[in-house]
Amino acid sequence: MLRVVPSGRSRSAEAAEGDRLACLVALERKALWLSTWMIHNANHLRPSRDGLKVGGHQASSASVATLMTALYLDVLRPQDRVAVKPHAAPIFHALQYLLGRQSRDKLERFRALGGAQSYPSRTKDGDIVDFSTGSVGLGVGVTLFASLVQDYLRLKRLLPADEPPGRMIALAGDAELDEGNIFEALLEGWKHDVRNLWWIIDYNRQSLDAVVSDRLFGRIDKLFDLVGWRVVTLKYGRLLEAAFARPDGEHLREWIDACPNSLYSALVFKGGEGWRDHLRRDLNRYPGIRAILDEHDDDALHRLMTNLAGHDMETVLDALHAVEDDTPTCFIAYTIKGYGLPLAGHKDNHAGLMNPDQMASFQRTMGVPLGAEWDRFAGLDLPAEELSAFLETVPLAQSAARRRPAPLIAVPDELAAPRGQRLSTQEAFGRILGGIASADSVLAERIVTTSPDVTVSTNLGAWVNRRGIFDRAERADTFREEKVVSAQRWAMSPAGQHIELGIAEHNLFLQLAALGLAGPLFGVRLLPIGTLYDPFIKRGLDALNYALYQDARFILVATPSGLTLAPEGGAHQSIAEPLIGLAQPGLTAFEPAYADELAVLLRWALAEIQRDDGESVYFRLSTRPIEQPDRRIDASLAEAVVAGAYWLHEPGPDAELAIAYSGAVAPEALAAYEAVIEDVPGAGLLAVTSPQRLHRDWRTGMAHGQASAAERLLSRLRPGAALVTVADAHPATLSWLGSVAGNTIVPLGVDRFGQSGDIPDLYRTYGLDSDAIVEAAARACLRMAR
Ligand SMILES: Cc1ncc(C[n+]2csc(CCOP(=O)(O)OP(=O)(O)O)c2C)c(N)n1
Ligand SMILES: [Mg+2]
């Protein structure tokens, strides 16, 4: 299984190389110290006000001290981008501190408000972080999609031709490979022939609770191999390799190779005596092994037996520098969780913290004088000036900022609304995008669409026919060449502007995350639009949350939605998604009813996702064709549509009743309105295009003592007036409107699974039809009168 690491550089030949190595080894020691100290400080020295343990991951950080130092202080070039495993945040911050890119103040406030974050965060830690991590597996996956984005831009010549491509790198915990999203990504990556991608697996054979199954990693390298990756296994360090080369050394190698993960970890924790007992018991018949045991005291034997390649700087550097082509490469680096700390190897070490006595003794071993704990070089055996000078030569130190500026893309003042008497919002979406596709504009050039196998059924067909599908290679549309009639033209080429994905929704959201970071990562802004069926947002929800947490910007078009997709049945009918729209940070949610509203909103969204303090935008659309209003949206109506609501029919003075609706149930709301207006003259009909924007504005208004849009609209009704809300969604989507001005609320909506049927049957069964609305209005009026 072990591949011999090719020696890429002639180190011994050049003294300078030796000096660099010495500096790196010294700074690795310092990074380990600082990460351990940072956590100790946060837990033991900073006063606690709430009795909570602060935490931090000393063992997980120690596990990658060598790998991270090698990367950040030697291998990485400014254009490389990294997702660091979440629990390596302390050592990541320590290395940034050594590079002068993180402040002592933030380290002292690790895990405190405004301090260095517990897991690397693009938005909270700033420029130093390329990809946020935290939810394991997703950071690994996003690097794959970032490499695809890099190729998308390079092949369209949007990146400077003279700049070599960056490597998209994930430093992954081994247990992250339990996450299915990694394998979904690997398969997708294989289809797209991804390049310049490195996954470095910190193979410490431990997760949070347990020691990782031995059987698993027996398969991992084959799996990567299967999808065209190079696998480089870094197993033993130079001390062990030298021991293996001695007489009988092969028996030692066989012994370690066969040692179960759990026994190896336990012996790592126990130390020299433990190793000796076991080796004596199993290998004493070999004179060569007896000689090794005799020559090593307990400390030396422990050092020998824990000399895994992932802790051997030279071996790590050789392996990383040896990769010179763009083949995706997986490094399996054997390490020890808690290496160099008294926590090493213990199965409970994930959240373990060194106690003050252990810390004091560690400080002595590290040679860090009392009071010099935050010093960048104290206790190292190289002069501070030399280390300082070395740090200035680090490739990563050669660029000012990691975030690239990306010029704005002009958005026209207006997008033409599709005409037609009866239209669905989904069809309108397809036509608006088709219209953009046929124009020759920068806007059209920078929109990129992507969809998990629902391109046609979400109405991206017209866009794709005009703009083509992206592929690294030119691929003809076979059906077309064979003259098989089809409305779809699916030729693929590097010029294509649609990324067709397999069904996995996690991949969609990770792809959107990467596309939505194209500006800061590569200096070229893209306007990504992803489509999927609304109910399957939940399938990829953590990846969506992940994308938004790092402030990736994109437009999500979710269609079809709700009971309204009627015959498709309950498995496909979304109910709770508007509540996700309401509650998900970083996402502005709209559910328009009419094509002209969508045209206004889509234009707004294309600008919004480019604003510094903007957000991504979610549209919940429908396949139901509905009668369109005969109107032209003027500026003030457009403003109201964007703000979240407007009166489709204005209430009269002192009105007693209003019906508020959102989305595809507009015709039922309108019919109910027309039915009640005779009995309740002056009733109003409120079109809600965005419950989320209304809600947010309501809360902001309260905080600042200003009237919000919802308050202004509802103040048109008499105090306590009856209010019926209706949406093809959970009733809580709109029921909160009752609190805005103290209306007598009756909320309609869906709170149990749907089923197959046609719209009239389903709306009647679930209480969304006009009769149900009229009845609700009567009830609300009665309650109001009481
Ligand atoms: C999606 C998700 N589930 C659970 C967790 C909680 N968790 C944090 S670390 C961890 C184990 C990580 O093990 P590994 O990736 O091997 O990292 P190590 O600490 O060994 O370096 C778990 C389960 C998480 N962060 N994300
Ligand atoms: Mg692990």
Image (spheres, rainbow, N blue to C red):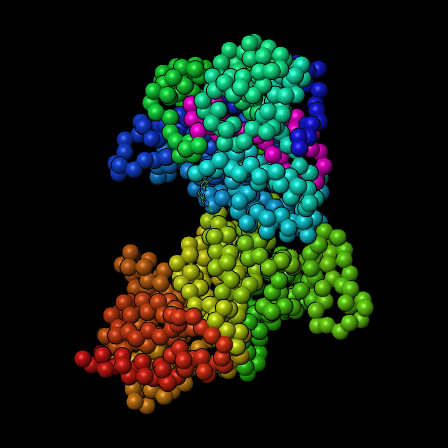
Residue 156 visible in the current orientation? no
Q: Residue at x 70, y 48 (%)?
A: 193
Say if the magenta span includes residue 328: yes
Residue 179 visible in the current orientation? yes
Looking at the image, which is closer to me, 291 or 180? Answer: 291
Looking at the image, which is closer to me, 470 or 540? Answer: 540
- Looking at the rendered image, the quarter that the N terminus falls into is top right
- Looking at the rendered image, the quarter that the C terminus falls into is bottom left
Residue at the extreme right of the image, as rendered: 482
Residue 392 lies, with reference to residue 471, above or below; the image says above
Residue 448, position as x, y percentages in the image: 62, 58
- Horizontal relation, residue 227 to residue 351: left or right: right
Q: Residue at x 35, y 31 (%)?
A: 42
Residue at the extreme left of the image, as rendered: 786
Residue 609, position as x, y percentages in the image: 51, 56
Q: Residue at x 53, y 47 (%)?
A: 179
Say if the magenta span includes residue 286: no
Residue 755 lies, with reference to residue 137, above or below; the image says below
Residue 556, position as x, y percentages in the image: 52, 61
What predominant SS class does the magenta segment belong to?
loop
Residue 679 lies, with reference to residue 79, above or below; the image says below
Looking at the image, which is closer to me, 639 or 667? Answer: 667
The number of numbered badges drawn on the structure is 0
Q: Quadrant of residue 171?
A: top right
Q: Residue at x 70, y 69 (%)?
A: 488
Residue 335, position as x, y percentages in the image: 54, 29
- Horizontal relation, residue 502 to residue 710: left or right: right
Query: In this picture, which residue range is highlighted in magenta?
Result: 317-346
Residue at the extreme bottom of the image, as rendered: 678
